[in-house]
Every structure is written in C-alpha cells, then in structure tokens.
Image (cartoon, coloured by chain):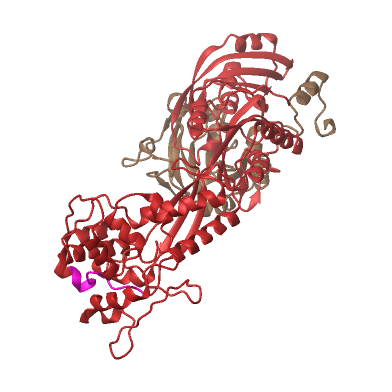
Amino acid sequence: VSSRLPMACGALLRALDEFAVTEEHVPYIERYFKRGYAVDLKGRRREDQCVLQHSNRLCVLCLAPSHPIVSSSDVLVTKVDYRVNEKLDRTENKVVGKRKRGAQWLNPLSPICIVSCSDGSQYTTYSCIRSSLLEINDQLLTTPNLLKEAPEAEGYLAIVKPKFDESADVMQSLETEERYREVCEQRQKLTD
Amino acid sequence: VVSSMCAKGSSSELVGQLERFGCCRRCIARFSTGVDYDAYAKMKTESSDLPLATQTRSRGCQFSARELDNNDEDGEGNPKKRMRTDDDAPGSEFQICIACLGLLQEDNVETHIEQIQSAVMASDYEFQSISLSVAAPQALLVMQHSLLIAISMECRAAVSNDMPSVKDVYKEMISQQLETRLNTQHSTQSQFEIEINLSHPESEDVVKRLCHGKRTVTLSLLKGALYEITPQEFRRFCPYPPTAYTKACCIAEIRCLHSSVFVAGRYCKYSRCISQTPWILDGVRKGKTSVQELICQRIQERWRADDVKFSSSGREDIDVRMLGQGRPFVVELINPHRSFVAMTDFAKLQRKINSDSSDIAVRDLQLVGRDSTKRLKEGEETKQKTYCTLVKVERLLSPTDCDLLNSVKDLVLQQKTPIRVMHRRSLACRQRVIHQMSASLIDSHHIRLSLVTQAGTYVKEFVHGDMGRTVPCVRSLLDSPAEVVALDVKSVETDWPPFLLSDT
C-alpha cells in the first residue's frame, strides 16, 4: 500500500492506515471532471474559456487562465451582468423539478454574462456548448472579482446541462488540455 | 327482482320444484333449509345426485323453442337423456346442476379438492394457517336470478334472504377438507393465501350478452344489469329456470401467495470499493459488489423468497465506510416459501453473512413488522449523524487552526444541491447544521476532523465548498482550499431496530 503513496511522514501514514486509504488522493477537479477548452472565442484573441464536465455529465463553465480577465495584472472585475441584452436576463432562468424543465437553451455562442473591469474594458462570456442553463453563479453578483481570483472554483460562470445524447459530443467539439497548452505556448513564442 | 320473504324450514313443494328444475341436493338444501355448513359436507350421495329419472322430466319442462341451441339434442329435436361432465370418471354420468354449475356436486368437489391439495403441496410452502380466496364464474349470478324468477312463478314457496351462495358453500367445503388434508387451520388472518380461479366457458356468452357486449364485465356491472332487467327481457338471454350445461366448472388457476416477511438489522461497511446498491452505468458495474447483494443473498435463500427489496435508513457513498453500530436496514422477502425461522436461526444467519465477506458485517438481525419502512425513514430524516474525516488543506496549518474548528457550535450552513447530485435532485438551497466539530493536526497539511451534523448534511461539500455553493465550509473557515481524503460514518443515531444482546 505505502509504495503507491507519495513520501509522507509517519503520522500521515498512520492516519492513512487508520482510515484504510489504499489509493493516492486525487484532487477534486481532476477526480470528478474532464476538461475542454474553447480558444479565441468569436475570433477575439486570448478570450479563452474552460468547460469542466462532471462524471454525471453536467458542465461547469469557467474562464481559462489565459483569458485577459484572469491574466491581466492590476485589473479588477467590477461588475458581472447576466442581463445579456434587452430581452434576455439569465438571472430569470427558472428550472423546475428533477427533470430541470423551463431552462434557457444555450448554443455555443450564446452569451452568458457581460463582465466589466476596472480599466473600463468589457468582455462577453459564452456558453461554448449546446446545453440548457441550470444555474448562474450569484456569488459573482456580490463579489465579481471571484472571476479573477478563483476562475475554476467560486468564480465559475454557470452550470449547464447538455442533452443526454450529446453529452460526449459537446466535449469533442472543444480543445483538449494538451492542445490548449500548445496554443498557449505558441502565443508565448509569438510575443517573445 | 324477485323479493323473498323470510321463511325458514323446508317446503316440500319447493324441494320438488327444484328437483324438477335440475338442482343438485346441495343447492336444494341451500334454497330451502338455510345455513348449516356442516350438513353440506355430510351430504355425500352414494351415487351422484340428480338420478336419471329426474333428468328426463326436467329436460321436458325446461324446454322452450328458443333455447334449442343451448341444449344437446339430436337433429330431430329429441333431447339427449344423459349429460356428461368434463372431468367425469368413465362410467359416472350425471347432469350439471343448473344452480351451481357443478361446483357443489360431489364428483366435482372431490376433483377440485385433489387438484388444490396437490397444487399447494407441489408449491412447497411453509405456513401456519391458510386462507382461501375464490373467484367464481359470473354466470352463477345469472343462474340464481333465473331460478328465483322460476320459483316465484311456479310455486308459492318463499326463499330465505339468508340463503348461502354457491361460493360460500363451495369455499366452506373446500377449506374444511383442506384443513384435514394439509393438517392446518383456516383463518381469515392467515398469511398464506390460496387463490382459486374457477371458470365456466360455456356460460360466458350469456353473461356478455346480458351486459350488452361490454368487453370486461365486472361483478357490479352484472349485478346492475340484473337489477334493472325485467323478467320478459331476461328471458331473451336465459330461460327460467335455466337450461343445464354440459360441462361443469373447472379450476382455471390455483395461485399460492405468502405475505411478505420483513427482516431488519444494522450493517457496517468496511470497504471503500463497494456501493450500497448494485451500481451499473452503461452496462458496466461500478464497484466490486454491493452491500445489498452481500446481505440479501443468504436471507433470500433461507426464506426461499421469489424476490427481495432492500431499503435502509439513508446511505453512504461507495468510497465511504460505515462504522460504529452500523446503519439500519430492512429486507422485504416477497412471497417467501419458508417461514418457520427460529431465533437461533437468525444468529446463525448473521454469523454466515459476516463470515462470507470481510467487507461488511451485520448485527441485530431480527423479524420486524410492516411498519418497518416508516421506522427506517424516520431515522433517516431526523437523527443526527457523526462522521470522521481526513482532510487535506492547501496552506500550512498550525494548532490554532484546530482551535478555530473546535470552537464551532451549531454552525448553520446554506447548501445548494451539490453538483455531483444535481443531475438527479431538484435544485434547491438546504439549510443544515453542524452541531459540533473536533479537529486534531496530523501534519502541516492534514487534519483529522470529527463532526456531528444534522440529518441530510452533505459532508464532502462542507469540506471543499462545492465551488462556493455550500456556505460556510471548511475551505472558507480556514481560508484555504480543502478536500476530503477519506470519510467514515461513525454513527447514525437510531434506536430502531431494537439492539439485540449479541453473541457475535
């Protein structure tokens, strides 16, 4: 057992034994989620987003670390507005029951929210995948800077549900983590 | 319908009339003497009732031009003199009684009893007592109706209101016989039911036509039709008295059913690789086996049940252990063929289950009543739970962090439906309470954390915060990402099922 676990001090080993832990601990996101990336959304450079698909096929939409909102230093997020146009307010999304009826439908380029930053810039975030909207992140209404501080945790954009039959397809339409890293490296080379 | 006045005692005029109509002795007794069930059984006839002499006479008076198709006749309209039953032993020939359609006639009764007895014995059940449920052909009502009209028209005798029905007498005779032959008692409270479905295909047509060709005829539908119909209209469907059929009622189906038996206990789960119930995703099984299968197999075998239903007072994830005194569960045994299980057998069964697998253990195995599901759910929704968890924290920890957690008392949480169950639960925000916590440092990044929580609290989410959807959480209290490395349920406080003094 202990040969599969990383080097740890005696006390931890004893505790792992007491708890009958036989496998190495896998961090939460890595254990339950698969990653997919959408880069240069709507042709805008570096506006990248990440989709985390849970093993139960629900998806959490997030900003990717390369997105200017997250990566630019000295800039804070001042406002997150889920009212994307005159007629559509994502906060009015009402989902009923286990079947999740009444949810707003999203296409890959459906806007999720409009983000305003302290330097006056504004960004639109997108769905990236075909799905129904289950929940927006109301923490962003009170603490918008969470988008920057914890984009893959408290700062997520929304939770969505792809159609059952499409749950594998939606992830296929996105870039893998490897490919995303390559893209970032290439960008880095260009700026160097 | 013909109204009858209460007049007990046999009237020879009535008896004679019924004989001429073509009723068997027991049916004549039903109409004339009133209830005395023992007498029916004793009314065995040396040969079958309805001696041949009566037949010819009764055939004559039953005849009406319209009913030719109901009778067995030769081409020239001469009635056949002898009718045979379906189940006749060769050589015995007698007419089918028009009132009971053969159900109360001795040869038939004997045949039925034998059939039922062998069916029950072949089905191989253990039972303390029996109860009988009989579904009789609907035509019996039509025959009764027809006879009452005939009686009222032919003679001045009155028929008792209390007269026993064919089904009553049949049931009584059968159960008396079965009590002797199966060496048991008949009781309406019995847990073992013998269901007998009788059929008489020949008369189904009359019933259907009376109910205007409705596809499914219920008893109440038929009763309604008979209540409303005038004798003249009735005669279009069936003469009064009715003409005899050629075949007696037979048993279409015998079904035995033992009511469910409930076995309760508590289980502990020591493995982090088995789910509570079988978990199959896309045809692939997740987890080695399940608590349900490990517990139910031996129990189902012992009671020889057709099926089992497993339920428990809450449940834990596949990677969570259930320790302490265990979690209450109930196994419902559907249609058990065995029910004589002694107290010592429970202890033996418990030992066997425990030795089968080191992944689980059961205790307090016992018989419980039908209210068990209610007791189970009560525990699930109201009782506190105690957990012990190994938590990994991102930042460096110090003993003061433990002090912080230890000082928590009745902390109120707002938990949105965790992402990991959002696909099958409705979206809501649930308020839950962490009553108390006890934390000790293992090393600079690990804590052993015990908690006592309100029922229905998601502990894993309380630790990692579920992306901010459980507030507050250990992550927010310690101001650093935190995750559960291992989780154990230490106790689910319940006093049901009763704790037993254990041997093992």
- Examine the rendered structure and indicate whether residue B394 appears above or below residue B118: above
Displayed quadrant of residue B446: top right
Displayed quadrant of residue A64: top right
Q: Is B276 placed left or right of A108 in the picture?
A: right
Q: Which chain is red?
A: B
- In depth, the one of B87 and B160 nearer the eye is B160
Q: Which chain is brown?
A: A
Residue B256 can be seen, yes or no = yes
- In depth, the one of B6 and B326 nearer the eye is B6
Name the quadrant of the N terminus of chain B: bottom left
Displayed quadrant of residue B77: bottom left
Q: Is B17 placed left or right of B196 in the picture?
A: left
Q: Is A186 placed left or right of B17 in the picture?
A: right
Q: Is residue B237 rendered magenta in the image?
A: yes
- In depth, the one of A32 and B156 nearer the eye is B156
Which is the main secondary structure of the residues drawn in magenta? Answer: loop
Q: Position of residue A183 (x, y in %)?
A: 64, 46
- Examine the rendered structure and indicate whether residue B223 appears above or below residue B352: below
Q: Position of residue B128 (x, y in %)?
A: 55, 41
Name the quadrant of the C terminus of chain B: top right
**Residue at 22% from the left image edge and 69% from the top image edge:** B240
Considering every residue shown, the one lying at the far bottom of the view is: B76
Q: Position of residue B361 (x, y in %)?
A: 70, 31
- In depth, the one of B15 and B213 nearer the eye is B15
The region drawn magenta spans B234-245
- Examine the rendered structure and indicate whether residue B211 appears above or below residue B282: below
Residue A145 can be seen, yes or no = no
- Examine the rendered structure and indicate whether residue B438 appears above or below residue A74: above
Q: How many marks?
A: 0
Q: Is residue B398 rendered magenta in the image?
A: no
Q: Position of residue A86 (x, y in %)?
A: 31, 40
